[in-house]
Image (cartoon, rainbow, N blue to C red):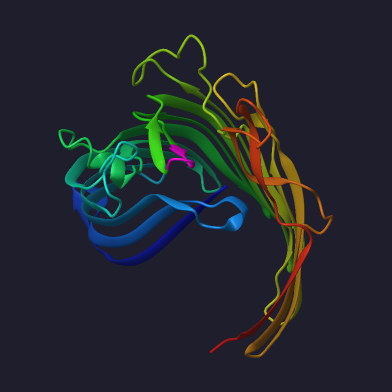
Amino acid sequence: MIEQTDERTIAGYNGSYAIKGNLGGIPMKSTIGMGFRADRAAVQLWHSPDRERLNNIANSIVFERSMNGWISEEFRFSSKWKAELGLRIDYFTFDVEDLLPADSNHIDLSGLNYQSLAQPKFNLIYSPVDNVHFFLNSGIGFHSNDARSVVLDKANHRLPLAAGGEVGTQIRYGSLLFSVAVWMLELENELVYVGDEGTTEDNGPSRRRGIDFSGRYQILNWLYADVDVNYSKGILLKEFFGEKLNSENLIPLAPRLTSTGGLNVIRPRGWEGALRYRLMADRPANELNTVTAEGYLVLDAAIGYRWEHWRLGLNVENMTNTEWNEAQFDTESKLFNEPEPLSELHFTPGTPLAFKGSFTYFF
């Protein structure tokens, strides 16, 4: 067994300023913004059979700082057409202090590196009538990386690219609001965390394609229903925006079908509550789909009573006491009496039937 700890201190700021004007008779809105964030993380990984710490596998102090600046220009060509152009620049510094001594079993992960990236975006919205909107969104961004991996590649000063786009529609009909979007996302590096070693592995570039559906309906003035359904498929590629690998091309643990939804009673005073579900279908646990990460359907409920400045509440998690897996991975393990390790599904059981009470004072 392993034990992971992450003690983190975070500080940051985000701010923006907007001004309206026109360009050649076209109404526009200009917004500029900036922000920064500083993290100090003490990250440890222990070998801990029977919940007893035996030896330290990873022990690092990570200082990660970032600054960003961005500008957004929104143009309203008519009552039906609107476009938005944007550009954001991020700059990161990564500073890792490895507290473990370097030897034949451990590489010193200490180091300093910086990475940056300019990220453009373009959005277009067409509204033939007030309650119908068609949209196209596209842009380039980045995905997070492990600071301990970044400092080992000191020649690379560009954040890993992420490029995506979506087309869809949003329609409101009376008390019903729903939207549908088809999307694609390409990652330059599909990073996989290796829990037993406390490191990340680069599986190469990847592509995800999917469709999202969202619905909201006000049944009564105090009763609301909502549902979200998402389907996607992810594959590993030979190169960024290239063809898929000939074999072992599935992204381990990438969700296929997910959904959430339920009924909500919302009132300014008196009784309130909710009955909700969480669903995740089976998905591949490795690149060949020879091991399956099991899906689940969990029901939750909540009830509360609010008056003036007070609220009493009771939450019921997993009200049917369903057995489900929360975290699960296809990794190797070996029992004491087994000659060779086996690669199979390892998991952390999900929360069983649980009750949580709350008392809130509003001021």
Instruction: Say left or right for 247 vs 361.
Output: left
Vertical placement of residue 181 versus 269, above or below: above
- Image-quadrant location for residue 275: bottom right
Q: Residue 267: x, y in percent?
A: 71, 75
Q: Residue 296: x, y in percent?
A: 73, 42
Number of marks drawn: 0
Name the foreground residue: 282 vs 125. Answer: 282
Name the foreground residue: 200 vs 236. Answer: 200
- Image-quadrant location for residue 309: bottom right
Task: From the image, give the main secondary structure of the stretch colored magenta.
Answer: loop
Q: Is residue 76 visible?
A: no
Vertical placement of residue 310 versus 217, above or below: below
Question: Does the magenta-highlighted stretch encompass residue 110?
Answer: no
Instruction: Say left or right for 2 vs 111.
Output: right
Residue shown at 40%/46% (left/top)? Answer: 79
Instruction: Say left or right for 73 vs 337.
Output: left
Q: Residue 57: x, y in percent?
A: 41, 47
Vertical placement of residue 355 versus 277, above or below: below
Q: Residue 150: x, y in percent?
A: 26, 40
Name the foreground residue: 244 vs 341. Answer: 341
Farthest residue toward the left?
155
Instruction: Say left or right for 64 vs 337.
Output: left
Residue shown at 65%/26% (left/top)? Answer: 291
Residue shown at 34%/21% (left/top)? Answer: 240
Which residue range is magenta in the image? 193-197
Farthest residue toward the top?
246
Name the foreground residue: 232 vs 225. Answer: 232
Q: Is residue 143 visible?
A: yes
Question: Does the magenta-highlighted stretch encompass residue 196?
Answer: yes
